[in-house]
Amino acid sequence: MNRIQLVDTLPNVFQNRTDLVSDIWQKEVTFEKGRIYLVEANSGTGKSSLCSYIYGYRHDYQGKILFDGEDIRKYAVARWTEIRQKHFALLWQELRMFPELTAWENVDIKNKLTGYQTKEQILAWFEMLGITDKLNAKMGRMSFGQQQRVALIRALCQPFDFLFVDEPISHLDDTNAAIMGDIMTTEAKKQGAGIITTSIGKHIELPYDQVFNL
């Protein structure tokens, strides 16, 4: 996949609002593979909804979303499955980890499905992010910042054309945020992929090609 386009897209909940000032809603916007984007927003302006719409998780919007010119409303379940397996990687704001599993198990359960990353690469990321000592810790007993780092590693255990990260450093210090940014950009460059990151304040420092205000 090379291009994601939004054409006059608007969450249904905003349809009666006349005070919207946005670079994305009710505009024509294009995200291109290989480029890096930041979507800055205030709370309640539809930031997480945007990710859910593009990921096909929600459909409560007006207008169109196109993948390489195709309207995604026409996609069958099998097509969405293929897109999520091979084209989109997503780090959810709420992470969606399994609290009863360990950090390693949360990552390994996905990598066993994809077979995409080596064990050595995964362990190297754990070490870079300073959480090697948490490999066998239950996710439910880890801090949110530690869970964010594990969630990023899990997100990277697949091929992708676009990496979506929804407020990825909200609970991280500057040092770990920078390391996370390096890991993301290195892997995206390796795959020739684009990155779309969102923020409601503290944002990850990346070489953005374009910044949108939601």
Image: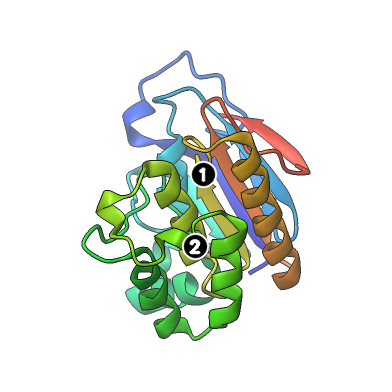
Foreground pick, 42 / 62: 42
Report the coloring of the rendering: rainbow
On residue 168, the disc is 1
Q: Is residue 117 visible?
A: no
Q: Earlier in the sequence, mark 1 or mark 2?
A: 2
The percent position of residue 108, horizontal first and vertical second, equals: 40, 76
The percent position of residue 52, horizontal first and vertical second, equals: 40, 50
* Mark 2: secondary structure: helix
Q: Quadrant of the C terminus?
A: top right
| Residue that badge 2 annotates | 132
Q: Quadrant of residue 34?
A: bottom right
Amino acid of disc 1: Pro
The percent position of residue 13, horizontal first and vertical second, equals: 32, 30
Q: Is residue 148 above or below residue 87?
A: above
Foreground pick, 154 / 59: 154
Q: Residue at x 33, y 74 (%)?
A: 77
Q: Is residue 126 above or below residue 13?
A: below
Foreground pick, 86 / 26: 86
